[in-house]
Image: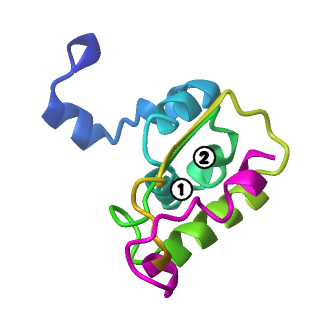
């Protein structure tokens, strides 16, 4: 630990040094996580409730790796973008294109489909 404090003493004193960090730094760290995990940090404490909204970068990972269906992934990303509003975004990484086929949307299997919402997400 820092300042000569060991782990046991830090835990006993209830020291939370992460919460002392500036919002911009915490948002940068959150932007390194997949977006769904970053959003989950909102339950940690009141201060963390809205931090994820100001992340400078989004990592949209799914649907099959993190979401049950393509529709679940679509709903999550659509809601995420709506809640963020017009906050600036430095980068956005989307890892979904290789997973989606018509079968993921309940149609003919194994026919690749460009993602239905990509254009609107980019706009």
Residue in the picture at 43% in, 32% down: 18
Asked if the residue at tag 2 contacts the one at tag 1, i.e. Cβ–Cβ closer than 8 Å, the answer is yes
Q: Residues within 10 Å of mark 2 (few under 14, many from 20)?
A: many
| Up/down of 37 relative to 75, above or below | above
User: Dot 1 surroundings within 10 Å: few (below 14), some, or many (20 or more)?
Assistant: some
Residue range corresponding to the magenta coloring? 103-123
Q: Nearer the viewer, residue 80 or 51?
A: 80
Q: Which residue is mark 1?
A: 39
Any magenta on residue 112? yes
- Please provide percent x and percent y for residue 19: 50, 36
Q: Which residue in the structure is indicated by mark 2?
A: 52
On residue 28, which mark appears? none
Q: Residue furthest right?
A: 86
Choose between 23 and 17: the one closer to the eye. Answer: 23
For marks 1 and 2 on the same chain, the one whose residue lies earlier in the sequence:
1
Q: Is residue 21 left or right of residue 87?
A: left
Toward which corner of the image does residue 23 lie, by quadrant?
top right
Picture layout, residue 71 above or below residue 63: below
Q: In this rendering, is residue 107 above or below 117?
A: below
In percent of width and height, residue 96 lies at 47, 54
CA distance separating discs 1 and 2: 6 Å
Q: Is residue 56 magenta?
A: no
Q: In the rendered view of the protein, which quadrant contains the N terminus?
A: top left
Q: Residue at x 14, y 36 (%)?
A: 8
- Secondary element at image label 2: helix
- Say which quarter of the image contains residue 76: bottom right
């Amino acid at each position: 630990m820092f300042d000569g404090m060991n782990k046991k003493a830090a835990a006993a004193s209830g020291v939370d040094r992460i919460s002392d960090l500036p919002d911009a730094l915490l948002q940068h760290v959150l932007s390194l996580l997949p977006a769904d995990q970053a959003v989950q940090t909102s339950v940690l404490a009141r201060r963390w409730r809205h931090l994820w909204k100001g992340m400078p970068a989004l990592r949209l990972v799914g649907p099959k790796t993190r979401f049950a269906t393509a529709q679940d992934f679509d709903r999550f990303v659509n809601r995420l973008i709506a809640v963020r509003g017009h906050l600036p975004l430095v980068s956005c990484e989307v890892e979904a294109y290789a997973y989606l086929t018509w079968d993921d949307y309940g149609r003919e299997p194994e026919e690749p489909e460009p993602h239905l919402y990509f254009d609107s997400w980019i706009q």
